[in-house]
Amino acid sequence: MTVITTIEDLRVLAQKRVPRMFYDYADSGSWTESTYRANEADFQKIKLRQRVAVNMENRSTATKMVGQDVKMPVCIAPVGLTGMQSADGEIKAAKAAEKFGIPFTLSTMSICSIEDIAQNTQAPFWFQLYMMRDREAMAAMIERARQARCSALVLTLDLQVIGQRHKDLKNGLTAPPRPTVANLINLMTKPRWCLGMAGTRRHSFGNLVGHVKAVTDMKSLASWTNEQFDPRLSWPDVAWVKERWGGKLILKGIQDVEDARLAVQSGADAIVVSNHGGRQLDGAQSSIEALPAIVAAVGDQIEVWMDGGIRSGQDVLKAWALGARGTMIGRAMVYGLGAMGEAGVTKALQIIHKELDITMAFCGRTHIADVDRSILLPGTFPT
Ligand SMILES: Cc1cc2nc3c(=O)[nH]c(=O)nc-3n(C[C@H](O)[C@H](O)[C@H](O)COP(=O)(O)O)c2cc1C
């Protein structure tokens, strides 16, 4: 039995335990996957300055994200089909996040519903909204998030149309998987996953089936998305969502300084510098490279967060040093969940927290609030 010490260990275990179509769905980017790779690789280029003979006692990584206390500047990113990585996956991840002391974001495209999360956790969670053509359904979904006492709404702006991920097309991604010969053969090698799924009734899109018109069957995720998602989404629609919701609003998927300025004008509470984990515009800058210019332009007017490529606490520290006041983790959570369920998500969070804390100490800081770009080696980070 391998001792799990890194997110990579969790990824390897998840690959063994999760049916191929769902593992591939997570471990892929669009087209050549250049942005997907750059998200991780660009973190590696940034070097830290080692400082010594500094009192490193009494450290804290605690801070706030949109006014909410967090044990570290990390939250769980919205990830579609999380409940296909492990049975009731969203509930498991939300529980792990709650116990750890960071926020969980539920995707519109989740398997467990908004109500499922509300019933199984006490801490307020966040809900991520995709804009669909059916505005009545949108209004109803916002209302359900309110009823479930969600404490922030995350509106994703970078998926009006879907980037092509070759593996999903080749695997014929569906939730639940179709009983084809290839799928059945693959499922036979995943007994743990099958057993989990046999024990839950949550096998399809819990937020949509029975709630959004025409959603009784979602054979092909990609073609369904192309039919239902609203390609017209623009800033007046953001204003519409903001008014309907009336609470904390986070805009996710900003990569450009101009868009960041428009986001500030929209009155949102935070923006997430994100390229959707390299799953949308292939060839876009990595998030960590895009971050500094956006922080310089709007960092004093709005909370700027980032996601994409975070696989360690060092990555979180580097993002913070470059001005991100929060981060989201997608695949790091997914791999933990696929590997070991709730315990795996907890493990992922522990790994990231410990590494963040110790690396901060090596850089001669004891409080995350005192970390800025002076911990980074000049010339090794984007400006
Ligand atoms: C499998 C998968 C599904 C995702 N589904 C959604 C989603 O439903 N809504 C959304 O806003 N972002 C979605 N994302 C993007 C994540 O929220 C986040 O931006 C991205 O995963 C960050 O990169 P990382 O995985 O390298 O941490 C998804 C990402 C992955 C990997």
Image: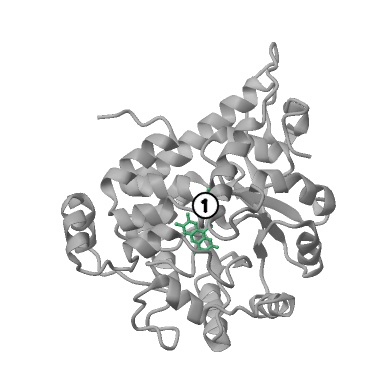
Residue 79 image position (x, y, % from top left): 47, 59
Viewer-nearest residue: 84 or 20: 20
In the picture, the quarter occupied by the N terminus is: top left
Q: Which residue is mark 1?
A: 32
| Quadrant in the picture for residue 289 | top right
Q: Report if residue 132 is visible in the image.
A: yes
Q: Residues within 10 Å of mark 1 (few under 14, many from 20)?
A: some
Q: Quadrant of the C terminus?
A: top right
Q: In the drawing, does residue 10 fall left or right of residue 68?
A: left
- Residue 240's spot in the image, x, y percent? 69, 81
Name the secondary structure under disc 1.
Answer: loop
Residue at x 53% of width, y 68% of height: 162
Where is residue 280 shown, x and y percent of the image? 56, 60
Q: Nearer the viewer, residue 98 or 208?
A: 208
Q: Residue furthest top?
A: 53
Residue 346 place in picture, x, y as percent: 41, 43
Q: Of residues 289 and 322, which is closer to you in this image?
A: 289
Rendered view: 265 above or below 360: below
For disc 1, does the CB lie below 8 Å from ligand 1?
no
Q: Which amino acid does the dot numbered 1 rest on? A: Thr
Q: Residue at x 54, y 77 (%)?
A: 229
